[in-house]
Image (tube, coloured by chain):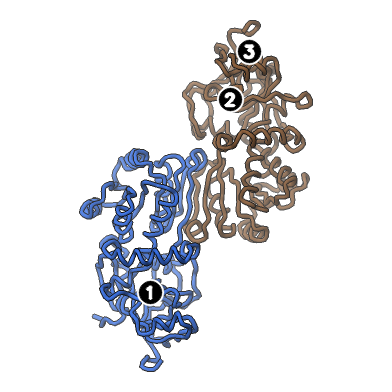
Chain colours: A brown, B blue
Amino acid sequence: MRDIPATMRALVLHAYDLEGYDSLTLEERRTPRPARGEVLVRMTASPINPADIAFLHGLYGAKKPLPVVPGVEGCGVVVAVGGGWMARRLLGKRVACAAGNGDGAWAEYMVAPALQCAPLPARVSDEQGAMSIVNPYTAWAQLAIAQQLRMRAIIQTTAAGALGRMVIRLARRRGVQVINIVRRDTQVKALQAIGATYILNSEAPDFDQQLRTLSHQLDARLAFDSLAGAMTGRLLAAMPPRARVVVYGGLSMEPIQAIPGDVIFDQRSIEGFYLAHWVARQRLLTLLSMQRELRRLSEVTHTEVQLRAPLAAGQRAIATYEAQMSAGKALLMPGMAPD
Amino acid sequence: MRDIPATMRALVLHAYDLEGYDSLTLEERRTPRPARGEVLVRMTASPINPADIAFLHGLYGAKKPLPVVPGVEGCGVVVAVGGGWMARRLLGKRVACAAGNGDGAWAEYMVAPALQCAPLPARVSDEQGAMSIVNPYTAWAQLAIAQQLRMRAIIQTTAAGALGRMVIRLARRRGVQVINIVRRDTQVKALQAIGATYILNSEAPDFDQQLRTLSHQLDARLAFDSLAGAMTGRLLAAMPPRARVVVYGGLSMEPIQAIPGDVIFDQRSIEGFYLAHWVARQRLLTLLSMQRELRRLSEVTHTEVQLRAPLAAGQRAIATYEAQMSAGKALLMPGMAPD
């Protein structure tokens, strides 16, 4: 641990707040020390993911004890290890890493379980490396679920976001059709530009009828829904019998709503998807083959960046990203000098 | 078809109406004629089921073309057959019968598919025979689903209704625990009287906490919900991870509501149950063994009757039943003289 400062700067959340994230403040904290099986990563970049925003609002799966450093993933260099061969082999390497049960990635340093770190090939930038877990794994998992259920076509909401674009590109490689739902005409154009075939604007007056026609035509019986609220029920009502709507986000900030008859009479169901649980249920071989494939597919997982900000500008960066998620990711760069 | 009058009296629905059933009128109609594989039943009794009420409101699975005679099941004597050995063997027999795709049971005569008629043993009364399909099959199917999923405990709403009581008795024979949810203290007492162990009143201020404690204690991960609305989400939120809420009715008349996080993070799901589809998915041997077992279990399927009414008093009978479903079934008796 020599050459490592005793304290570091970190964004610290003090209260889960449905209305905002005013309690998120930049603080000087003791630099954490890795235990056995863990590594200490000097962070270079960490994205603001929708999952992070849900976490700030107290809406994410495992609420952590407060105060806590948010941030589910990032990229950095392993500068110390806590012992164990898994950790030791990472020393000095540039890695992508996912946060464990404690403090997260929005800090100058993060302790991460060695098992949740992957060395990055030289051709992958820090920025792309910082976003190489949550969205790519989710896109891969969604296509794996689709193929396990022998679906030839799927539906996704917030299709113009970083994950949505990844799903579009990965599905094309897999020969799976995607019905993409967006909320603005500019997003329709953006997805046409990357070659998406089926794009529906949910604000269009005939959206529900269009979705019904198209989902029946393509036999799309699996939807991945990041919005929840009324959209879950609209998907369910439009889709063919035996459809499943898999909710994996609550961006609408509204409760799931659905007409009972749509669930009762046609064997439709509402299920959930949570990446951490999906990963925990997979065999190690599946995960290794996923990592290998994703490493090859950097053009599939490439993510646009709309904003880079130092930790000191964290709150502002979150607000900018939240206002238009489909414009690209926002990255927190702990090494960047404040304005 | 000799000895069969050319016309009959029937309750006829002219409009699906979310607000009521004013368009249901007693009419003189041509007596229907059975086609091949069908029988003509002179009806003696037919219950008013929650499914019938949903049908009147236009909320039931298959909306039939109007005008139509409602009524999903009943009891009567087969007075004519349309040909085919399945139909011929029923001639002259007293049967329980379920309606086909056309007109239903709330009439002096009904045409039913021979496959949906079962001869009644002499010891079964017309009244009990008239209710021997919808509820007993549903109770049997719910326990079959529970056992297929290896559930040691289930949860049910509207537990004080006819179906709820059947489930309690059948579950006891199967060694499956039931957490019974009711909405009134008098219903708590009624279920205690028939020996139910776990009874919760959803109007109690600590209901959600009680349900959480009990469902975790008994590992109850399967709920059958006839209400929908907010109850579906309350069940889901209280139950242990990997819980399924199976919605089979919408008695609350409200959309299903659930918090996205309750679906996303703990592999909980919302599914549907529709008896007709369940039956269609079973092997014939399963259905035969179900019928055989239910015939033996007349004490399990016995249903209280709160009201008998001639067809002419149909509207009033529905309103009375709707006002307090757990007081017993209401039966329409086509042979009964009007007041």
Is B217 displayed left or right of A147 in the figure? left
Residue under numbered circle 1:
B118
- A242 or A159, which lies in front? A242
Closer-to-camera residue (A292/B43)? A292
Q: Residue at x 73, y 43 (%)?
A: A169
From the image, state whether disc 2 or disc 3 is nearer to you: 3
Badges 2 and 3: C-beta atoms under 8 Å apart? no
Whether residue A176 is visible here, answered yes or no, is yes
Of residue B223 and residue A339, the one placed in the foreground of this image is B223
Quadrant for the N terminus of chain B, please.
bottom left
Residue B117 in picture, x, y percent from top left: 40, 75
Chain letter for mark 1: B
Which chain does tag 3 point to?
A
Inter-mark Cα distance, 2 to 3: 16 Å
User: Disc 1 vs disc 2: Cβ atoms closer than 8 Å?
Assistant: no
Percent x, y for residue A305?
Answer: 72, 31
Drawn side of residue A107 relative to residue B101, left or right? right
Query: Label 3 vs label 1: CA separation?
Result: 76 Å
Secondary structure under tag 1 reads strand
According to the picture, the residue beneath numbered tag 3 turns out to be A80
Up the image or down, B311 lies above or below B221; here it is below
